[in-house]
Image (cartoon, rainbow, N blue to C red):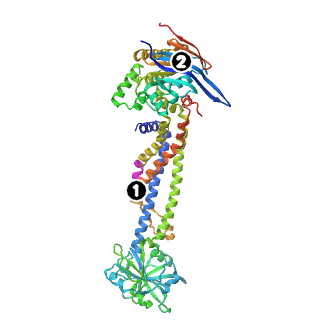
Amino acid sequence: MAPQSIISLTDLVKTFPVGNGEFTALNRVNLTIDVGEFTGLVGPSGSGKTTLLNIIGSLDCPTQGEAHVLGKSVSTLTAREAAELRNNHIGFIFQSYNLLPVYTVFENVEFALLLQGIPTAKRRTMVMEALEWVGLTDKEKSKPSQLSGGESQRVAIARAMVKKPAIVLADEPSANLDAANSHHILQTMVKLNEQLKTTFIFATHDEKVMQYLRRIIHLQDGAIVRDETIGEG
Amino acid sequence: MLLLKTAFKNILGGGMRTWLNVAVLSFTFVIIVWFNGITDGWVQESRQETIAWETGDGQFWMPEYDRYDVFTLPDAHAPIPNGYREGMAKGDLMPVLVVQGTVYPGGGRVMNIQLKGIPAGQTAVKLPTQGLADREEISALVGKRMARSAGLQEGDYVMVRWRDRWGAFDARQIRIAGVFDSKVPAVDTGQLWLDIEDLQQMTGMDGEATYLILSVGTEVPVDSGWVFKSLAYLTADLDEMLAANRIEMVILFIILLSVALLAVFDTQTLSIFRRQKEIGTYVALGMTQKRVATLFTLEGTAYSLLAIVVGAIWGTPVLLWQAKVGMPMPDLIEETGIAIGNVIYPIYTFTAILWTILVIVFSSALISYWPARKITKQNIVLSLKGKIL
């Protein structure tokens, strides 16, 4: 069966005003990502990988071109439609975890489900399942301030995965972690990718992350310079 | 509901900053309720006392009488029209005769006063006129203010001089039958109360009066030639004075509330800058920026809701205790001419408390929305990185 495209970018351009001129963050990017891919956007700082991730996540709009995510054009989505897309289909993992500080681990993971209006009992089951995926069931009552960096990032992964989204966007997820923790969270994500067929897209320049990627898209100065698929094993 | 729960959770997680805001707001809430209670207590007491001691349910003035114009007094007496006789017989109407006079309280002092005659057996007002029933000699009642300024005591004799209906001076010693304690200066300061029959006899104004007091709770009789002055007219001065006082109270409320809301505004403004990543995270998790702005507005509003709960917890016993023991007024207050007691007992009405709650909640919502509305225009990509300054 032919792979099903989940993200399609056509002649994507993104510019930002800088002083009197403008900075081109993405320059005519054409890209298709299929369901279940474990892909990385790789490149130096300023290459446009985070900008690309933000557009895919409907947090930002392209200046020109088309970005279709799950069949929806990001440019034409209203604020509410974009929020619904993120809430229902996209999970985010950030470099600095972005956990809500006054919430417990359980509540942080639960929050996305609350937005979806899922009933309490079902919510609890889903949260505990997500915490089990990342091995943090014993920390459900802890506050983010009581967690290590690795644990915080695992909570962030649980929060992104709890709603079983079609796409998870991870922006430098291992940047604040040591090698052991980096491998741990990546192994977790690989496992979830395999189990749930979730499409993972990373923005990274971390060699440790690249070891796990099955497709690496190299960006430089806002353009794709190389798109390589890594062989099995 | 989710937003409200989240807002409460966020502010409860805010620690000391939250409790400082709540403390300031709850203090403001209790103080405003207390001030309102004091004002309402004063207003109610002033009106009740004025009605009970001075105005009754209204008055019929003989046409020449004007209580604000002392020059009308020499002509402000006339035979009571027959149409009012039935009401007088039933005790619904009480005649009062007002005549200008002078007292010589001793020590070479002279004081211009009003001699007021009222039936000794009257029940229309609270003046203890039964003390005037002694027919053996002419006696008078004075209020405590008058007694103090003239140095009079019960049992004293004081020289009183007046003009009779023909303008001739007359004078005699009058015994002070009693000193009454009234909160209404208008029945006290510069006045001597006599039995109306004595005064009519002294002035040759037999069967005459200046005005009639309508007993509380009786129907206004048909017009028989004298001018009816309603309670609203008679208490207009009091109402104006109280309205002016209300304005002062409102200004004080605004100042108090502004200080408290400044704390909320400061917290909200700081929050929006300090919690950039959190704002971005909410959006990434699936909230619209508008909804996040609503969440932050609710957080500011939640301070006031929490403050009302906290204020109710510590304020209720304090306010109830105050309602029981009252608030003592300084002695000098009696000299202001306002009907006010030595102690004011606050009255807390449901409406006043509800209004206070609504004002606090609405104004804190407004003051929270002001900085929070900026969230809708924020660049979320920068927010997520905490790069907005």
Q: Position of residue B93 (x, y in %)?
A: 36, 79
Is residue B315 one of those drawn in magenta? yes
Who's the residue at 43% across and 50% down the image? B357
Relative to residue A203, is residue B52 depicted above or below?
Answer: below
Badge 2 marks a residue whose secondary structure is: strand
In the shown orientation, is residue A70 left or right of residue B89?
right
The number of numbered discs placed on residues in the rendered structure image is 2
What residue does disc 1 label?
A: B351
In the shown orientation, is residue A60 left or right of residue B345?
right
* Residue A153 in sight in this render: yes
Q: Position of residue B376 (x, y in %)?
A: 53, 37
Relative to residue B321, is residue B148 depicted above or below?
Answer: below
Q: Label for residue B123?
A: none
What amino acid does circle 1 point to?
Thr
* Residue B26 in sight in this render: no
Relative to residue B37, is residue B95 depicted above or below?
Answer: below
Name the foreground residue: B138 vs B370: B370
Which subunit holds the residue at mark 2?
A
In the rendered view of the protein, which quadrant contains the N terminus of chain A?
A: top left
Which subunit holds the residue at mark 1?
B
Relative to residue B61, is residue A48 depicted above or below?
Answer: above
Q: CA distance from mark 2 to mark 1?
A: 65 Å
Q: Position of residue A97 (x, y in %)?
A: 50, 25
Q: Which residue is the extreme one toward the right?
A: A20
Badge 1 marks a residue whose secondary structure is: helix
What residue does disc 2 label?
A: A31
Mark 2 vs mark 1: in front: 2
Asked if labels 2 and 1 share a chain, the reply is no
Is residue A169 one of those drawn in magenta? no
Label 2 neighbour load within 10 Å: few <14, some 14-19, many 20+ = some
What amino acid does circle 2 point to?
Leu
Q: Which residues are magenta?
A: B312-319
